[in-house]
Amino acid sequence: MTEEIRFTLDGREVTAEAGETIWQAAKRAGVEIPHLCWLDAPGYRADGNCRACMVEVEGERTLAASCIRKPKDGMNVKTASERAAKARKMVFELLAADQPPQVRHPDPDSKFWKWAHELGVEGSRLPARERFTPDPSHAAIAVNLDACIQCNLCVRACREVQVNDVIGMALRGHEAKPVFDFDDPMGNSTCVACGECVQACPTGALYEKSLMDEQAQTRTVWPDKTVDSVCPYCGVGCQTKVSVKDNKIVQVDGREGPANENRLCVKGRFGFDYIRHPERLTTPLVRREDSPKRGDIQVDPRNPWEVFREATWEEALGRAAGGLRDIRDTHGGGALAGFGSAKGSNEEAYLFQKLVRQGFGTNNVDHCTRLCHASSVAALIEGIGSGGVTAPFTAVEDADCFIVIGARPEQNHPVAATYLKQAAKRGAKVIVIDPRGQELMRHASHPVRFKPGTDVALLNAMLHVIIEEKLYDEQYVQAHASGFEALKEKVAEFSPEAMAPVCGVEADYIREIARTYANAERAIIFWGMGISQHVHGTDNSRCLIALALTTGHVGRPGTGLHPLRGQNNVQGASDAGLIPMVFPDYQSVEDPDVRRRYEDAWGQPLDPNRGLTVVEIMDAIHEGEIRGMYILGENPAMSDPDQTHARAALAKLDHLVVQDIFLTETAWHADVVLPASAHAEKLGTYTNTNRQVQLGRPAVSPPGEARQDWELICEIARRIGLDWRYSGVPEVYEEMRALMPSLANIPWSRIEREGSVTYPADDEDEPGREILFGEGFPTKDGRGRIVPADLLPPDELPDADYPMVLTTGRLLEHWHTGAMTRRAGTLNDLEPEPVACMHPRDIERLGATAGESIRVETRRGAIDLTLRADRDVSAGMVFIPFCYGEAPANVLTNPQLDPFGKIPEFKFCAARVSRVPQAQAAE
Ligand code: SF4
Ligand code: SF4
Ligand code: FES
């Protein structure tokens, strides 16, 4: 039972819950006490250093800081006594003495000035101390320590909330000041620009440059409105507060969403200006008759007029739909295909797959999930009957151990990473397994670097230990799992001693990590594309599922399986049916009962055969089977493996319609380009990696003639003969929901009201279920299926000609193919040029120096990039981010597919590296 404390506050009897401070209890009672060094937000502890919150406690000689003082039964607290009010006013006056005058203040509307005015303090009678020099070195954040009150909030924000450990408080007393690393200029420090300190700072000493004058010293911009929305980048799904001035986004802050509790990363906070980039598409374009398609074409998005001409909407839509309709009517629906987008909303994804299935008459519809977690989903559906996560990443708060394998959350899911780092600080055992080193290993009890491509060897060896040493949960296995005996037989041959030379991890260490995971009370596994993007990606995931099922680490708080989903809506787009084998909610297109339901709902017969996947569609174009495509918000010319092959395929199409916000590399090959809406311009729902369905609201209107994506899909649908009439996004959502059991009890009105609802929800009044499968699995027999995996080497091993291993991935600052982040000013300033990362020893062996130009070649092509030294990259390996259009990593990658998930092997191929002669590099 929660203990309640009764005390008197300004003459009223009030109650405090156990652990609450006077300040918190007063707030609940409707009394807000001034405060500066206390931030009433999740993750912040009170520090009690500024004395702005002093109150009088009857019978006590000194005043008490209400932000740290806890009430006791019978205590009599006066917040507004003359003594308390006078003391608080004096505190503000003292602090104001060192502030720049309000007219020249970094933020004249800061929390500091708000409270100062409330207390009647307009300035100070006291002499000011010496001024600090402004530090404008960071691309997005201005540092004006003139306005600093040494409240220490930025230090707690950086170290305790985001766990980045960059800011510290240096010197003492009057001299004290926040510093970055060793008192470096912020722009030269290891700051990752999450901006948590900016959001926390009560004075504006740390402030967004986007709201300030050119010198970054005084605020000049005040928004007209603020809109609650959700971040457009990764699958974490941080909720945002978007501030707008003159139809332009000027600031983004974090909101208290279930996945971020006010936190953001650099992309969500500072990557907002791409939507007003001069290259934004604002009018429909059609290809000029005299511009034939070529796979090696380069189009300047600022001057596309040699290839395209402007068109009216009527002409563009007529041509777009006409071309698709003609191919369907002449060659059949199987000659068409569509790529939808994991960046669009659920409603757009639903409409798009419906258009392809109902309007084109084929299941050839896919999206980039194929390129990120298709193998994980294949293994999860096979193993536990569901493709979603069994627990949110925030469940790590209850775990005493967790594994992160093949994932770099600090770069790709930065806000999720903050929860993992907090759990590590709390004392959870952390096993980080990756061929490349990473920051998270600093927090790991068990960092594990292993040879790339040998995941099954390592994981099977762990399973071997768990079975040999009887560390498995016999009761759980008996009640909830099948396939244990087959696993036992398979992993018998995978002893740690036998696998150590294969995976490069010592046998004793393999035993130790296996014991650590299996013996934990509650353990959870997170994985990323280092697991899934292999020809053995499904096998890798099968091993992880086997680990969870043998140890019973699933279905309870602090346990589970969590593939960290990449794009902001890759979970939702998959749920909504942008997959060639399944209708919405993963219902097989080959199941006659399921199909009948969709045929009844959509009023016509549907294709009974599974469609082609992303890479298969490219091959089918080369073979002349696919002749026309509609691509919405995806960029396969950059994201597909073996790019030369992919671009040649796009160029070969008789008809290509691209709907996007920029003239992407894919759009270069289009017949018709439809200018669409950016995330911040539209209404819709998005489902994050935690299965939380969240509402994105429009903050600004689309530029020029650009239109809403859902309307454009409907325009195409009507023009190819479908009678689609939707009144708006909510109606689309409700139609989709009627076909998706997972969204039962989550009507549009509920999402609008609550902003975020986890599915499944058992009742409209009940919160959704975060932890799934405590009572068994949604499989035919209710049991989880353990599927043993065998060793399968990567498709293309290094040899004498190509002696290195190439691996690809993302950077913190750039998202996916870079279409948005390369056009976001701050993000591009932070990471402006294509780089290839190698271990310093390999660089030395090459006779090169970091910063020079190098050529990376594979059997599929070559690109030139700037060499960067990185000790995290193993010897013998080269890492290239795939976001750079001028040096596209996917020219190099291997399109070989995992046989189950049909995902290409982006994470491993043979490569060679050479220096580029200087004269050539300068050209
Ligand atoms: S910079 Fe801001 S948050 Fe940091 S100590 Fe100074 S006033 Fe406090
Ligand atoms: S963690 Fe992901 S969702 Fe959150 S702000 Fe960063 S990019 Fe956006
Ligand atoms: S807000 Fe309580 S001491 Fe600063």
Image: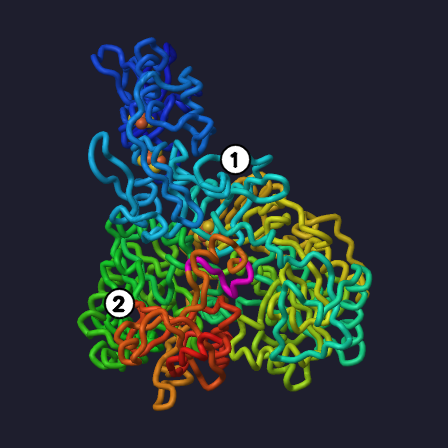
**Residue 628 x, y percent position in the rendering:** 71, 75
For marks 2 and 1 on the same chain, the one whose residue lies earlier in the sequence: 1
What is the x, y in percent for residue 705? 73, 53
Between 543 and 671, the one nearer to me in the picture: 671
- Which residue occupies the foreground of this view, 757 or 659? 659
3D distance between C-alphas at marks 2 and 1: 49 Å
Would you say residue 249 sits in the magenta stretch?
no
Please provide the residue range marked out in magenta: 812-820
Q: Which residue is located at x 30 percent, y 13 percent?
A: 76
In the structure shown, which secondary structural element does the residue marked by tag 2 occupy? strand
Residue 493 figure quarter: bottom left
Relative to residue 634, is residue 402 drawn left or right? left
Which quarter of the rendering shows the N terminus?
Answer: top left
Q: Is residue 588 visible?
A: no
Numbered disc in front, either 2 or 1: 1
Q: Name the residue under label 1.
A: 220
Q: Nearer the viewer, residue 641 or 70?
A: 641
Q: Residue at x 40, y 54 (%)?
A: 414
Image location of residue 438, percent across then percent down: 31, 63
Q: Name the residue under label 2.
A: 448
The type of residue carrying mark 1 is Thr
Q: Residues within 10 Å of mark 2 (few under 14, many from 20)?
A: many
The secondary structure type at the circle numbered 1 is: loop
Q: Which residue is drawn at 55% across and 48% down?
A: 694
Rendered view: 484 above or below 860? above
Label 1 Cα neighbours within 10 Å, binned few <14 / some 14-19 / many ≥20: some
Q: Can residue 566 be seen in this view?
A: yes
Q: Is residue 664 above or below residue 792?
A: above
Q: Residue furthest bottom?
A: 800
